[in-house]
Every structure is written in structure tokens, then in C-alpha cells.
Amino acid sequence: FLKGKTALVTGSTSGIGLAYAKALAAEGANVTINGFGDAAAIESERQALAAASGAGASYSAADMTRPDEIAAMVADCAKEFGSVDILINNAGIQHVAPVEEFPLDKWDAIIAINLTSAFHTIRAALPGMKARKWGRIINTASAHSLTASPFKSAYVAAKHGIAGLTKTVALEAATFGVTANCISPGYVWTPLVEKQIPDTMKARGLTREQVMNDVLLAGQPTKEFVTVEQVASLALYLCSDGAASITGANLSMDGGWTAA
Ligand code: NAD
């Protein structure tokens, strides 16, 4: 149902972002993916997306800490495919440390990648969406946009920030056929989660199994990780006409975490 539409997904060489790209391509959208990783693996993902969609697929290596590269990524996507109709801000990193020991460079990187990059993509993509009277902006927030956990000060601050940015953009775009929403997953099994296990073991003095069961899934009542496919299916729904009146929402998909 997305034939003729173009989607740009930041941080989509892995995890949730790649699942968004695959779901959008399966509906026939042109897709621009972005993120870091092995060049050959990214190229084969790009080819697979084009094959799945029967439409176009491109890759941008833009670094989400660099406003100039972000602006160029949005402009290149619009130039190649004619428009950016669906923008998914998804790039994100994590660092786990007590606030008084939190490395300054990690704080700056998390705020830049997880929050400020979305400001830059939105300001570049929104004028075209408004002009065409159709657009979908979807930001991957997190359960941490609604609640906090210790040792994640930068991440929680950035995710609360993106929830506020999303609401503001939703109000500004409301009469232009453009919606802006957050998807807020609980723990999803991706490389981002796997990579934070060692630091959490250190910060809390726990074993790997204890971190998985007593920390990560402790607050997730289903006791199951969310899957990347489930997150992507919510994004597809938000792109549908049925979701045209959902805007400014922060949609939880967290196995009941924030209900508790
Ligand atoms: P991931 O590590 O698998 O993917 C992150 C993506 O961002 C990768 O493609 C990576 O290359 C890209 N990226 C990182 N730094 C970048 C930069 N400077 N410029 C461009 N791209 C960059 O992680 P994931 O778990 O799929 O996370 C995706 C999003 O979902 C993040 O915003 C994360 O905060 C959010 N999220 C994840 C979970 C979870 O449990 N995994 C839960 C809630 C929210």
C-alpha cells in the first residue's frame, strides 16, 4: 500500500531500523537506509530491499552527529526518489554509567544521535511533506521516554526529549496531512540491548543471566523481549490511512512495562 511513497529510516543497518526498512519495502515503498556497518553487508541489504519492494533502495552513510551530513542525506533521498513521505528517526546508542561518572563525550553523542538528529531530519523533510499535504514522521522513542532507569541519564533525557519534540511537530503539522508519533518499545532483542549487558553486569555486580532476567525483563510483565517485526508492524499501521488521526501520540509496545 506504499507504492509511490518514499521512506527514509535513520539507523537502519541493524535491529529495529532494518526491520522498519524491510516492512516498508515489502509494501512497495522506495527506501533510504542509513547507519554504520560492514560495507558489503549494507550493500547486500540494500539490494534485498530493492528486490523486495520492486522499487528503489539507497544507502546514506550520514553520521547522525553531523547536521551537515543529515541535511545532505534528506536532500539526496528527495532528489533520488522525488520526495520524502515517511521519515523514521530511529538511530540510537546507549551508554550505562552512574550520572556523576557519565563520560562527557557519551552524553554529547547520545543527545546528538538520539535526539538532535531528529530535529535536523524533521526540519529538512517537513516542508516537502507539508507542500504535498501528506507525511508520516515516526520517532523510535522508548519506554524510557515515559519512565527512568538508573545509570541511563543521557538516554532517558534524550528519549523524554524526543517525545516532546514529536508532540510539538504534531501540532505544527496537524492541518497539513502530516502526522508525527513516537513508538516506545520496551526491551527489544537487538545488538543495542546485547551490547549493554556487560556494562550493566559491571555497574550492578550481576551475572549475564541475572541482567537478562532480573534487570532487563524484570519490569516487562510479559517476560518476553519485544520483536523487531512487532515494532515494524506498528510503524506500517501508522503509515496507513486508518492512522491519519493518530498524531502526537506516544505508543507503547513494552509488554506492559509502563502499565506497572
Ligand atoms: P541497533 O544498535 O541494532 O541499531 C542502531 C542503528 O543506529 C544502527 O543501524 C547503527 O549503525 C545506527 N547508528 C548508531 N550511531 C549512528 C550515527 N552516529 N549515525 C547514523 N547511524 C547511527 O539498536 P536498536 O535496538 O535497533 O535501536 C534502534 C532504536 O530503537 C534506538 O533509537 C533505540 O534507542 C530504540 N530502542 C531500542 C530498544 C531495544 O530494546 N533494543 C528499546 C527501546 C528503544
Image (cartoon, helix red, strand yellow):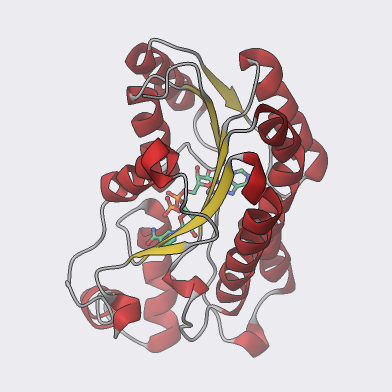
**Front residue (pair 70, 98):** 70
Labels in figure, total: 0
Tell me if 150 is positioned left or right of 99 in this view. left
Q: Residue 247: where, in percent of width, then height?
A: 52, 55
The x and y percentages for residue 127 are 75, 36
Q: Quadrant of the C terminus?
A: bottom left
The residue closer to the viewer here, 19 or 82, is 82
Q: Nearer the viewer, residue 105 or 26?
A: 26
Q: Quadrant of residue 136?
A: top right
Residue 176 seen: yes
Residue drawn at point x = 74 percent, y = 26 percent: 75
Q: Is residue 91 visible?
A: no
111 sits left or right of 148 in the view: right
7 to 232, vertically: above or below: above
- Which residue sits at x=82%, y=38%? 68
Q: Position of residue 187 (x, y in %)?
A: 33, 65
Place residue 169 in its image quadrant: bottom right
- Asked if residue 118 is positioned above or below residue 209 in the image, the reply reads above
Which residue: 39% across, 87% down?
Answer: 204
Q: Considering the image in quadrants, where does the N terminus appear?
A: top left
Most extreme residue toward the right, as rendered? Answer: 68
Work out whether residue 250 or residue 256 is closer to the camera in this orientation and state it: 250
- Name which quarter of the figure residue 254 lies in: bottom left
Q: Position of residue 109 (x, y in %)?
A: 69, 60
Say if 77 sits above or below 246 in the image: above
Asked whether, in this view, residue 179 is left or right of residue 115, the answer is left
Q: Is residue 138 left or right of residue 253?
A: right
- At 68% from the left and 22% from the top, the residue drawn is 78
